[in-house]
Amino acid sequence: MPKLMVEARDLYKSFGETQAVDGVSFSVPIGQVVGFLGPNGAGKTSTLRMFAGYLEPTKGQAIIDGVAVSDDPLLAREKIGYLPENCPLYDDMMVVDFLRFVAEVRMIPPSQQDARLRLVCDRCGILSVLGKDIGQLSKGYRQRVGLAQAIVGDPDLLLLDEPTSGLDPNQILEIRALIKELGKEKTIILSTHILPEVQASCDRVIIISDGKLVADDTPDALMTKGTASRVSMLFGPMDSATVDVHRIREILADIPETRSVSSRPGEGDGTLGFSVDVGGDGDARSALFQTVVQHGLPLLEMHREQVSLEETFRKLTQGD
Amino acid sequence: MIFVRRTLSIAKREFQSYFNSPIAYIVIGVFLLLSGWFFFTPLFLAGRSTLRGFFSFTPVLFIMFIPAITMRLLAEEVKTGTLEWLTSMPLRDLEVVLGKFLAALGFIAVALAITIPYPISVDMIGALDWGPVIGGYLGLLLLAGAFLAVGLFASSLTENQIVAFIIGVTFCFTLYMVDKVLFFLPEQLGAIFQYLSVDYHFRNIARGVIDTRDIIFYFGLMIVALFLTMESLKRRHA
């Protein structure tokens, strides 16, 4: 079994009456990039904050590399680099002064600070803005400085809370590439409510909703699992005296894998389109094909529709 | 050793950030202007070589100036969210609080150092008794330390700097005034209130008499206020 970097043991967090995190357990092995997904207010930030040591769990334990955050907060914090939501930084400081401050607090020996900072700034692409005040930076550069401060101490784990929120599409791509690069050598948990982000950069997705964990899988598996897959079919013009829409529906509905059949627009010229929702884990297309051939229906086209992560997400987080 | 280095890192950052904003220069400028006024007026009117005017009015100035120096120390970090980031760094609350306190104390020390030409110029006009002057400066530093700790506590209570300022002024004003409302209090109660007054202890030290009781009072006040600040910080992430 691979060594665990992060472990949430039955975490609870309540603020007065509100239950922000409601019994969340998961574990992340070393080196994994995990997307922490959920609608706004689902408890993502609260969970990350409990790992970062900013919030104390009401119940349960947050464990980082074998160290419970509540037992030895300092040791646990040395192992993490944290980028909070909205990237709060000291606006009145110059980038280089700020990073040097981080290096000092992280106990990097003065003789090694220059080399370390140069390496970090080079990786994050901020060498050109070192002399600027943080408050004057564009959002993209600001976010890069936020990532740079997180890796100054060379921690094993990065906790990134919505690292791309508020950026324009180009900046989002740049930050994603940077995260992907960092993910090669570090364990990363990044929270987001933007789905493509997870598909782009994560090995694994954890979805939480209303403080509860509702899914935990790879992005690809999540796209197909949990929802029925759907096959769309297109038939050529037929003699309407013998075969009509209702008859085809009946034929398709007779197949054991079929859950429901609905009509969809054809391509004109008498073609007929259908959507078939099929259940089960296997591929229903061969069964569909056999049946269609048995009844001599002129099949023009058949393909499986990808159920998007969005759909899975909506289904899981709206409790339907 | 690590504790000292981290505390000093915080202190250095805060101290530099004072001088990154115009507020520092405004505060020092106005402080020098007002304290200079209180220094020169009695000097020329009374014609005596003494700094009594300066030393009796500076504590009053501190009631306003020190909360202005401390108001942003924690309130601003809460408001901008940097406190969340700071608490995720490998730092103890004590290192953060003490570092900020030392930075503010350093700032006040700079402001006071700029007033040293006052006693030197008085000494050039007529022989100055340096005992009360040294006691006065020591007393001002101790008084400032106590006010700074109280102001820092006020700053930990809110994320609004103006509110932090008002709370700080109220605390400092109360600590200054407690022994000035003694006349309508019973005698035993009066002694207690007198002991709680920052000005009472300051006047003792400013006479040039360094008594451990006065020094213990100031350090006690600082420790209590800094402790309360840490408790208040802890409540934020409970």
Image (spheres, coloured by chain):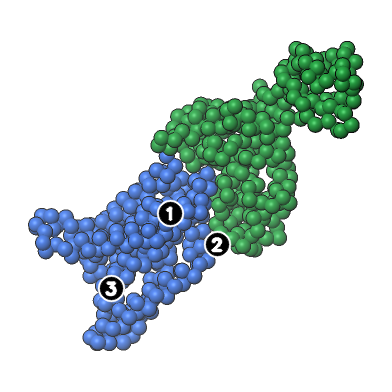
Chain colours: A green, B blue
Q: Is residue B76 above or below residue B47?
A: above
Q: Are marks 2 and 1 on the same chain?
A: no
Which of the two marks, 3 or 2, is nearer to us in this view? 2
Labels 3 and 1 share a subunit: yes
User: Residue A82: which disc?
Assistant: none
Q: CA–CA distance between discs 2 and 1?
A: 18 Å
Q: Is residue A40 above or below residue A86?
A: above
Residue B16: give x, y in percent of width and height.
Answer: 51, 63
Q: Which residue is mark 1?
A: B159
Mark 2, chain letter? A
**Residue on which the image places disc 2:** A92
Separation of disc 3 and disc 2 at Cα? 34 Å
State the quadrant of the C terminus of chain A: top right
Q: Are marks 2 and 1 in contact (CB under 8 Å)?
A: no
The residue beneath circle 3 is B57
Describe residue A124's horizontal placement relative to residue B75 as left or right.
right
Nearer the camera: disc 3 or disc 1 = 1
Which amino acid type is shown beneath numbered disc 1? Glu
The answer to whether residue A257 is above or below residue A173 is above
Provide the chain ID for the residue under circle 1: B
- In-image side of A267 versus A157 (left or right): right
Q: Are marks 3 and 2 on the same chain?
A: no
Quadrant for residue B49, please give it: bottom left
